[in-house]
Image (tube, grey):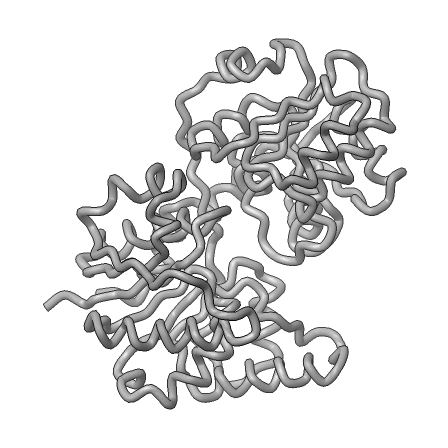
Amino acid sequence: MAERILIYEPAHTGHHLKYAQLLIRAFTGRGRDVVFASTQESFASAEYATLLKECEPLFTKVALAAGQPRRRLGPWLHSWRILTLAERHGCDRVFLPYLDAYFRPLGLLAGRHPSARRRRFEGILFDGGCSFDTAPRDIGDRLRRWAVRTVLARGRFERILFLDEAVHDSYVRNVGGTRGRLVLCPDPVETHHTIPAEEFRARFGLGADAKVIGVFGMIDPDKGVDLLIDAFEQYRPDPHERLLFMGRHAPAVLDHIHRCRVASQIVSVDRFVTDDEMISGIHAVDVVGSLYPRHATSASMVIRAAAAGKPVLGSDFGWTGRTIRRHQLGMVCDPLNEASLGQGIRWAFDHPQLDPSKAAAFARQNSVEHFTEVICADLR
């Protein structure tokens, strides 16, 4: 009988279902049975229709009960539900594409569930909710570190995969007894697209000769979009200079655009966009924006831009800043500093550049094929 793997992913926005799609293809391609658990809202979403509908013959679909657990107890209730689902569907392995919310409660509860010891648990950990390389901020931070060390010491997780090399190295240095279980993993991006740059620009009203900074995915303040709008307005752009925001917009961003004096030079596509549209858009713009003010871990848009050979205007904070500097992928600035962000916008419109060979090498490290090799390394 083939090994059966539970993939548990209740969220459907952002990258959540994309990771699920790649995992389903990777595991079923190695002859495994997959059970995919998500919400009815997820199954009814445009993201699911685009990314997973055609893959349905490959997996067993399980709809989670309606309603979300209360915020404080949510991760614990989700974790117990994961253990129960794995038992109910006879799963040998559990894989969590976004492990952060469940890592500590699942690791601590697994020892109390009657069948958990018979199963392997794995997942992708973005930052684990704590950093080991700084002094503890408070008692809560100390408790989180204790829980992380306790979970890892008990060996509940067969493997934990990290997309951010700095976070991976921090865990390896500071948590003993984890040899072989903490694995650095590529952040996979696809490169195929079907819309030529000229057609894309015409379709979305960008203009053939316009200079464009593009931001893709969830368009919200977490990505520094409001800061970019303000700085763009202060910059006083020439008529041929544009911002492109492509993806579902937070209400605060829509309000910001409407109040902006240069709103006519902001092209706003407020809806779910397919991978094909996103990748085609990245190829069509001049510079890709990744201006998270305080996003410490991996940002796939930087990788997508590198794969397209496009420079990035990025935040100097965390993974984004380190990666752009190390691989010479563009320019970094402080999005919270108006003068710094203004200089970044001027660079983007006047003389953006990157090292093409380094960008291509970095993109190859994060290919879907490399991701599949790492994810399936222990599958025979």
Identify the residue shown where x is 69% and y is 23%.
266
Please tell me which residue lies in front, 69 or 51.
69
In the rendered image, is residue 336 in sight?
Answer: yes
Q: Residue furthest front?
A: 67
* Left or right for 283, reference 4: right
In the rendered image, is residue 314 in sight?
Answer: no
Q: Quadrant of the C terminus?
A: bottom left
Q: Residue furthest right?
A: 339
Quarter of the image for residue 59 reads bottom left
Q: Quadrant of the N terminus?
A: bottom left
Question: Residue 248 location, x and y as percent?
Answer: 55, 37
- In the rendered view, would you say 175 is above or below 131? below
Identify the residue shown where x is 74% and y is 39%.
226
* Left or right for 15, reference 325: left
Identify the residue shown where x is 85% and y is 26%.
235
Identify the residue shown where x is 48% and y is 35%.
272
Question: Residue 307 location, x and y as percent?
Answer: 51, 35
